[in-house]
Amino acid sequence: MSKMLLRTTADIFFKRTPMGTFQIRKGLDIKLKGQAAKEIKTLPLSKTIAVAPCDYKGLKLRLSIKEGDAVKVGSQIFQDKFHPEIRILSPVSGRVAMIIRGEKRALLRVIIETDGKQEQESFKKFNEHEILGLSQKDVTTYLLEGGLWPVIRQRPFSKIANHRNHPKAVFIHAMNTEPLALDVDVLLDKKEKEFQLGLDILKHLTKGEVHLCIHARASAKALTEAKRVQIQRFSGPHPAGNVSTHIQYVDPINKGDVVWYVEAQDVLRVASLFMNGAYASERVVAITGEGAKNRYYARTCLGAPLSALVEDGGVNGLRYISGSVLTGKDVGKEGFLGFYDSQVTVIPEGGKREFLGWLSAGFNKFTVSKTFASAFLPEREVSLNTDKNGSDRAIVLNNIFDKYVALDIMTFFLLRAVISGDIEEAEKLGILECDEEDFALCTFACPSKTDVGEIMRSGLDLIEKEG
Amino acid sequence: MSFVEKILKGIGSNFEKGKPLEKLYPLYEALDTFILTPGKTTPKAPYIRDAVDLKRIMILVVLALIPATFMGILNTGYQILQAKDMAYDFGQALALGASKVIPIILVSYMAGGLWEVIFAVTRKHEINEGFLVTGILYALTLPPTIPLWQVAVGISFGVVFGKEIFGGTGMNVFNPALVARAFVFFAYPVSMSGSNAWVAVDGYTQATPLAVAAGTAKGSSVVEALNQAGFTLNNMFVGFIPGSIGETSALACIIGLAFLLITRVASWRTIAGCVLGLLTITSVFYLLRGPEKLAFFDLPPYWHLVMGGFAFGAVFMATDPVSSAATDTGRWIYGFFIGVLTGLIRVINPAYPEGMMLAILFMNAFAPLIDYFIVENHIKKRLARVTARKS
């Protein structure tokens, strides 16, 4: 009885609807123009692909090949300096065409010319029955060997997991709420078997639970009928789909805890590695944004060049982002797809100067404040470019942030603690439960154009370094 | 590139590095981005940004102050006509009022603006638009008779010691406009209070409603005393009474308030807190009224809302986000105590009939403490979660 009472109270406080859905109230869906059609088109293998060390946060990578070397799918390109067993493999077969270095000879990326044969390095194969009987050690070993360890990331710090840690839970990130994001339902359509196998493999990694975090409206059977995991449903505006949100509502991190998380798409790759004994390099990517002429879901290869994915119709002045407009990376037209990205967004560049802009009524301006006339018009799809719409200023409106953060965080005070370098206070205020991406909407909305995410990232980096 | 852009670029070339006017770059930057939007793009994620910036916010506050400024000008003229026993004429009142008020506003902007530029140049940052608000807020809290040099000294003190000394915009503990006003209030009491200050006619004396109420003898009716002096509720609401330039008209403040609330620039919690606080304390006084008590006790609580600087202070001064509490709960508390303190100072303390300025400054000092307790409470809850999980 008392347990039931406790539950009902919890339901009220956490706003859990009867179905067991976590209803997120805070946040914002930016209805950006340029949604992709939800059909997957398989693209031919591009002529070149890139493997970039900067994608792998938390690793210090060393080259294992040199220019001119022939590589197969699954040949080692990099290994970690401190944990040589963590390997980064080639997603294609062909020849190492170029090793690009930046300042102080820092490795920027390795460009591989494909030969179209896709010859494979072979790894150990397992059948379904064998998979259920594996141990934690086995799974770790084969993931490391098969080059898929980097798909497992940890919180706090959002970096590649340390395989010697024991996570208290593993979260599967199977929903996206960022603008124009890939719909996981489409990705997992008719993939029940593979997805379940992947979950079963990952289940071995923790003594705790595997939480499969899905949208309340998710329809793919792979998600709704998944077994041996805890299905957690979320609804509401972005950031309802962020990993931090899922973790805080389901099983929050306290000091000393580590949880791991994996993208839904990478669960399929894990399954493929164990089932087929080959490094899976396929990636489904939503091609979005009003700058992209054709918008669709592309089945392509890891590290594919954006030029092979996006047709811009010869228009100049576009911004090419691997990822979403909120958290992606500006890679340019000649850039390549990021390791974890399942979306490419192309939007127009801003920078047009407007006469007496501060005085305009602003029927055509998009704002979440109520300072332009457009705020009083009915909601509609918006076209946004990369204009910053203002200059950097000190923070004046100090209480606008919290309504865009779905976490139990006092954003302004956390921000102040980080700015003043007060790590202890920042930890008390819950910085370890956060990631840069959780504050993207704050940065978006801030009239003083404060990069809230970057400040939080610097706080996390400082804690990581000193801790 | 448009015509305007070309002209600006031409002017700008004189302010570039190595050019004679290099040091004054912030001045050019302010002009440049005032005429044309900055046109900068996002260097990293998030790549899209909201259309609002601080310039827009500050301009909206200035727009919200237009009714109060207009009423201030009109009333200043009206009071002069009355003192001279002349018939009221709209145009004449406006012209007379403008001749007194506009110089005060201009001097406030120029003297304060000069300090802004000096600090922007030495600290090498852009000029903050916040000054557009501070400059006019301060001017509107002054009596129309104030000598212009005192206006300049006051705003200089406010900008330098109220804001820049704390590190500039966003860092100040006190509302700079109020610091400026408090400075002239204590430094030049003769110009700032007493019955000579309020009507811009030499030798003409006229008390403000608050002074009348505070001066009413025990045992007599304060409402009657006010009415006799010509201060009916209607009069005080519309604002044709002696007082500081911008604060006499509660109506103008309410129009400004509506604008600030629709655009969500001001925090309704702070304002609601102020009103609630003032009504609470004055209701207590009202309940305690009697022939033995101060006559001021006898004033119905809602009269307080339209008297003195309360409406102006609650809408435009207390709501300054930087110097008020930053938490939602904190804003209720902060506002509530501003209201309570204002009532206390007005009614109980005979030395200062107007309590709003001091109440806000006092609560500015306490705002960080209010926030501190709310944040500590939050931290405690987080800790409780940890221990609950471990057991």
Image (cartoon, grey):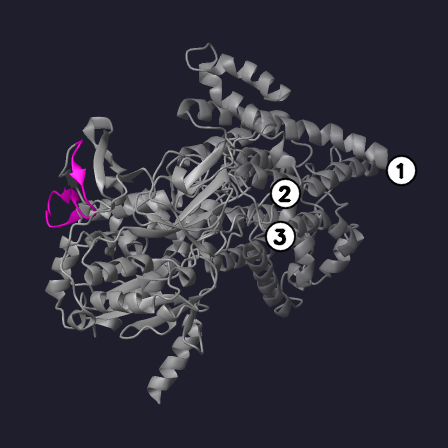
Is residue A76 found inside the magenta-colored segment of the image?
yes
Marks 2 and 1 in Cβ contact (< 8 Å):
no
Q: Chain of mark 2?
A: A
Q: Which residues are magenta?
A: A67-87
Please tell me whether mark 2 or mark 3 is closer to you in this view. 2
Q: Which amino acid type is shown beneath numbered disc 1?
A: Ala
How crowded pointer 3 is (Cα within 10 Å; few <14, some 14-19, many 20+) is rated as some
Residue B111 position (above or below residue B355):
above
- In the picture, which quadrant includes the C terminus of chain B? bottom left
Q: Residue furthest top?
A: B20
Query: Which numbered circle lies on residue A364?
Result: 2
Question: Separation of disc 3 and disc 1 at Cα?
Answer: 38 Å
Along the line of sight, the residue nearer the viewer: A322 or A19: A322
| Residues marked 2 and 1, same chain | no
Q: Residue at x 35, y 36 (%)?
A: A335
Disc 2, SS: loop
The chain to which mark 1 is attached is B
Q: Are marks 2 and 3 in one subunit?
A: no
| In the rendered image, the vertical position of residue B189 relative to residue A132, given as above or below | above
Residue A154 pos. (x, y %): 24, 56
Residue A446 seen = yes
A119 with respect to B68 (left or right): left
Q: Amino acid at mark 2?
A: Asn
Q: Residues within 10 Å of mark 1 (few under 14, many from 20)?
A: few
Residue that label 1 marks: B87
Disc 2 + disc 3, Cβ < 8 Å:
no
**Image coordinates for residue A127, horizontal then vertical, percent:** 18, 69
Which label sits on residue B261?
Answer: 3
Which residue in the rendered view is the most extreme toward the right? Answer: B87
Q: Say whether residue A91 is left or right of residue A362.
A: left
